Amino acid sequence: MRQAGRGGARQRWSARLAVASAAGAGVLLLCVAGLRSVGLVAVGAAGLAVSAAAGWWALTHRGVVRGIALVLAVAAPLAVLASYVAARLLWLVLASLGLGVLAAVAGWTALRTDTAAGTAPGRPVPPPRHACLLMNPRSGGGKVGRFGLKEKAEALGAEVVLLGPGSGDVAGLARAALARGADLLGVAGGDGTQALVAGVAAEHGVPFVVVPAGTRNHFALDLGLDREDPSRSLEALSDGVELRVDLGRVGGRVFVNNASFGAYAEVVQSPAYRDDKAGTLLRLLPGVLTHEHGPRLTVGAGSVTVDGPQAVLVSNNPYRVGDRAGLGRRDRLDGGVLGLVSVKVDSAVEAADLLRGRHAPGLVTLASRELVVGADRPEVRVGVDGEALTLPTPVRCVSEPGALRVRVPRHRPGVPAARPRLEWRRLWGLAFTAGPALPVVRGPAGEG
């Protein structure tokens, strides 16, 4: 009870600091600059808008226009700073921004009632009799060899199949392992390979182990696994618990993370992209973003239709779009829905409007069990967990709730809690109304 009381007191004092800092920022501006404070804010907002608009021109034009746009994108914020210096108010702006940052940090601290990493408990299970792990020695710059994953897995009684340049059908190798009597499948490799074998495991109802030996390992991140030391994931073979998580399916192909359509998928599948990434981006983006090249997409999810987005991301459960610190993370993998992030920008004004974040009309985020991506062409390029594919349109994307049995170590880092949204009414009530602390909110990946 004493610890809970101390926690509630810390929350209240953090809320008071947040409210006081936010008020202090406004009072400082008004007391020092008076009505000129409105102009300071307006000049700063205008500089950001001009810089964003110029960035759009730079992405959608070539030659001289692109050069002028790049200069303008850099010059606009510099001009804002110069105006503050000329007015001898730069210190005031910096002090007010500092108070604003302090208010935000204190507010997040007050509203975040559980800062510890969350870990779904899972269901205790006995060790497998015949585990088979597919390992890609080249993945992640050679993590399989660097961490001795093959030797450690074999010491735990697992069969290891090394994937070479001529390994061919990875899903076929997984099915062959099941035919040999494997009662658990696993992959030490990237997310694309993880998805292929996870689809086989789900199809046959056997558990699946993720060993994060790839470059990014987003699936492992959202399972709360240790990406710094992939060998720790092998503990799932001897002291594991089992979770039920969802799979996504795009045009019949399983994905564990996401499927991307539009500008990104078009550019990365260019033959020149591998050898000249920056040059290929600058050469192809103007045509793709202005719909001169590539398909014109449509997205339908329930009653929502988006016509002509330049970028579409469909994820296996929604990403934390509103939390920039946690962007790319999912709070859970068992919500039974797909996440959609769609971006549509057709002018410099709309590009500047994206600064409004989730309130921008060109940004659509939602969750749905099923959605359909159409195009004005019979085929569309798709990036599925980092793998380049071409699929016939329309492309149907669906969530398969609880389709995959994932076995993870009992002890693992867990998923960091999401940063809460700043709600000033709640902060005011917490700061100046006596009462108990906010309730603990939990929802780690895989918990159902």
Image: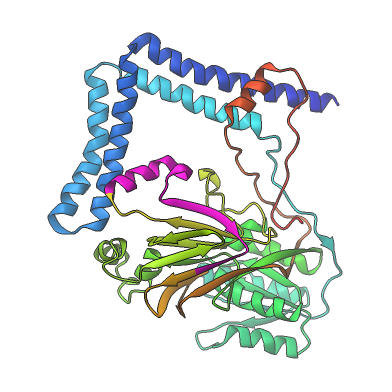
Is residue 358 shown in magenta? yes
User: Looking at the picture, does residue 278 appear above or below residue 148?
Assistant: above
- Which quadrant of the rendered structure holds the N terminus? top right
Q: Magenta residues, as a range?
A: 348-372
| Residue 89: percent from left, percent from top | 30, 17
Q: Residue furthest top?
A: 31
Q: Residue at x 33, y 74 (%)?
A: 270
User: Looking at the picture, does residue 2 appear above or below residue 136?
Assistant: above
Q: Residue furthest front?
A: 303
User: Looking at the picture, does residue 328 appear above or below residue 353?
Assistant: below
Q: Is residue 309 left or right of residue 89?
A: right
| Residue 372: percent from left, percent from top | 52, 69
Q: Is residue 192 left or right of residue 49?
A: right
Is residue 439 shown in magenta? no
| Residue 304: percent from left, percent from top | 51, 58
Q: Is residue 79 left or right of residue 426?
A: left
Q: Quadrant of residue 11?
A: top right
User: Looking at the picture, does residue 36 appear above or below residue 281?
Assistant: above
| Residue 128: percent from left, percent from top | 82, 75
Q: Residue at x 85, y 67 (%)?
A: 125
Is residue 160 visible in the rendered image? The answer is yes
Residue in the foreground of this view, choosing between 430 and 10: 430
Residue in the foreground of this view, choosing between 63 and 218: 63
Q: Residue furthest left?
A: 64
Residue in the foreground of this view, choosing between 51 and 39: 39
Q: Quadrant of residue 200?
A: bottom right
Is residue 227 visible in the rendered image? The answer is no
- Which quadrant of the rendered structure holds the C terminus? bottom right
Q: Quadrant of residue 62?
A: bottom left
Q: Residue at x 59, y 83 (%)?
A: 170
